[in-house]
């Protein structure tokens, strides 16, 4: 025999191993000695060093991990936000109902008698619900520069905005700024949506009105004879009526509006 000791120890401790060897003489030669053998496990350590971020109302789950010691492990935690629980096997799960930065104390014990234990503090960040706080858009004037900034609370920055239904001439950038120069008048329904870094989203329907400058019936940015011509066409039913054509605000589109435009046009 080559004298190779091998296998997988199943218990720990300090062992005294009696070793003997014989040779091939006749009579044989024998020698014996006692050797010390120490069997230990690696130190018990918590391998989980951070928590993934969560959000109110969103399902959350994470499995804790440890190394060393003698499995199986038993876990315990303290300081979790409401809505989350931890099983003895180390599974944290649930739907958080509170937001903020939580200091969570994590403890693990192994199966030694007596058991070894490890403890650490980890931060769990839970974000508030993503919610658009802009409830209305300021009125715009056709052919005038326009800007409006959308607002949101909660969620994880950065957020990305989109908007549909804007009047011609206006756009919305990803930062949530609506800007440009509107080229049409009327009442518009604008749908704005926002998405955060956790891929959560919110949307809202907003009303927006674009009015014309007094006297600028053809919405070209200036009050001139072109506006008089436009009122004449509407007066004779060649074009559809528009609110901008009732210059003197008497409820009718007639020659009185042409006179009003002339007054504006000539600066009287």
Image (cartoon, rainbow, N blue to C red):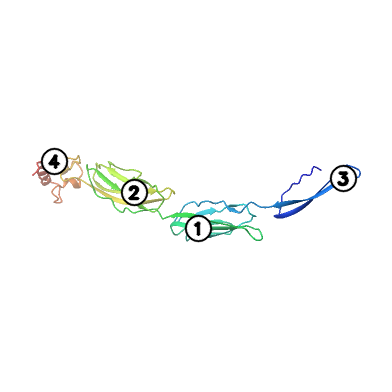
Decide which of tag 3 and tag 1 comes sooner along the chain: 3
Q: Residue at x 48, y 55 (%)?
A: 124
- Residue 158 lies left or right of residue 145; in this view the side is right
Per the image, the residue denoted by label 4 is 228
How many other residues sit within 10 Å of disc 1, few (<14), some (14-19) or many (≥20)?
Answer: some
Q: Which mark is residue 29?
A: 3
Decide which of tag 4 and tag 1 comes sooner along the chain: 1
- Residue 193 lies left or right of residue 263; in this view the side is right
Decide which of tag 3 and tag 2 comes sooner along the chain: 3
How many other residues sit within 10 Å of disc 3, few (<14), some (14-19) or many (≥20)?
Answer: few
Q: CA distance from mark 3 to mark 1?
A: 65 Å
* Element type at mark 1: strand
Q: Which mark is residue 104?
A: 1
> Which quadrant of the rendered structure holds the C terminus?
top left
* Element type at mark 3: loop
Decide which of tag 2 and tag 4 comes sooner along the chain: 2
Q: CA distance from mark 2 to mark 1?
A: 40 Å
Decide which of tag 4 and tag 3 comes sooner along the chain: 3
Q: Residue at x 38, y 48 (%)?
A: 194
Of residue 14 and residue 125, the one placed in the foreground of this image is: 14
Q: Which mark is residue 191?
A: 2
Q: CA distance from mark 3 to mark 2?
A: 97 Å
Callout 2 touching callout 4 (CB < 8 Å): no
Residue 60: image location, x then y, percent = 50, 54
Q: Number of callouts in the render? A: 4
How many other residues sit within 10 Å of disc 2, few (<14), some (14-19) or many (≥20)?
Answer: some
């Amino acid at each position: 025999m080559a004298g190779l000791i091998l296998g997988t120890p199943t218990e720990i401790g300090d062992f005294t191993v009696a070793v003997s060897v014989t040779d091939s003489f006749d009579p044989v030669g024998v020698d014996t000695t006692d050797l010390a053998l120490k069997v230990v496990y690696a130190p018990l350590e918590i391998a989980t060093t951070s928590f993934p971020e969560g959000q109110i109302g969103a399902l959350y789950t994470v499995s804790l991990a440890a190394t060393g010691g003698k499995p199986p492990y038993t876990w315990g935690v303290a300081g979790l936000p409401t809505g989350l629980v931890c099983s003895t096997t180390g599974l944290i799960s649930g739907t958080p109902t509170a937001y903020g930065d939580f200091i969570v104390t994590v403890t693990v014990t192994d199966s030694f008698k007596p058991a070894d234990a490890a403890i650490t503090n980890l931060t769990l960040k839970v974000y508030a619900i993503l919610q658009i706080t802009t409830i209305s858009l300021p009125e715009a004037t056709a052919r005038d520069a326009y800007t409006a900034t959308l607002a949101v609370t909660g969620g994880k920055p950065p957020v990305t905005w989109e908007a549909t239904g804007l009047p011609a001439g206006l756009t919305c950038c990803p930062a949530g700024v609506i800007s440009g120069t509107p080229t049409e008048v009327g009442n518009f329904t604008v749908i704005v949506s926002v998405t955060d870094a956790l891929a959560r989203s919110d949307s809202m329907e907003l009303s927006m009105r674009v009015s014309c400058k007094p006297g600028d019936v053809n919405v070209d940015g200036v009050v001139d004879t072109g506006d008089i011509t436009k009122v004449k066409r509407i007066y004779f039913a060649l074009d559809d009526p528009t609110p901008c054509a009732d210059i003197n605000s008497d409820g009718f589109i007639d020659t009185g509006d042409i006179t009003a435009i002339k007054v504006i046009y000539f600066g009287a």
